[in-house]
Amino acid sequence: MIDEKMHAWQDIKSFWIFEDPEINALSLETKKISVPRLHIPLARQNIGATREVLKKYIPEKKQEESLTDIIARRLKF
């Protein structure tokens, strides 16, 4: 459940974890046209454990941060 919406594993194409000294974020690439990517701040989560669990269900695929993502992260949104 993300933002009060359910997202099924089969609706997610891949994931990538952006690691940053200030904040880590999980990016999910979805099959939905209306919501192609979901970004979830990971705060104090164990990145290694999170990655291992996700890899059991969806492939890990490197993603590039969009300009919007970079600005939002810098402004701490």
Image (spheres, grey):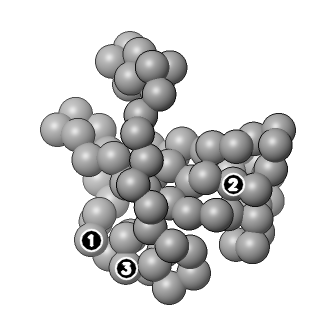
Horizontally, residue 28 falls left or right of residue 67, namely right
Q: Is residue 70 above or below residue 50?
A: above
Observer able to see residue 72: no
Q: Which mark is residue 70?
A: none
Q: In this view, does 3 lie above or below 67?
A: below
Asked if the residues shown at circle 1 and circle 3 are in contact, with their CB atoms under 8 angstroms apart, the answer is: yes
Kindly identify the amino acid type of the residue bearing the numbered disc 2: Thr
> What is the distance, in whole Å, between disc 2 and disc 3 at their CAs?
19 Å
Residue position marked by numbered label 2 in the rendering: 30
Q: Which of marks 2 and 3 is nearer the N terminus?
A: 2
Residue 22 figure quarter: top left
Residue 39 figure quarter: top right
- Residue beneath the point at 44% across and 61% down: 61
Residue position marked by numbered label 1 in the rendering: 48
- Residue 3 is situated, as x and y percent measured from the top left of the image, at 71, 44
Helix, strand or loop under label 3:
helix
> What is the distance, in whole Å, between disc 2 and disc 1 at their CAs?
22 Å
Horizontally, residue 26 falls left or right of residue 8, namely left
Residue position marked by numbered label 3 in the rendering: 52
- Residue beneath the point at 57% across and 54% down: 28
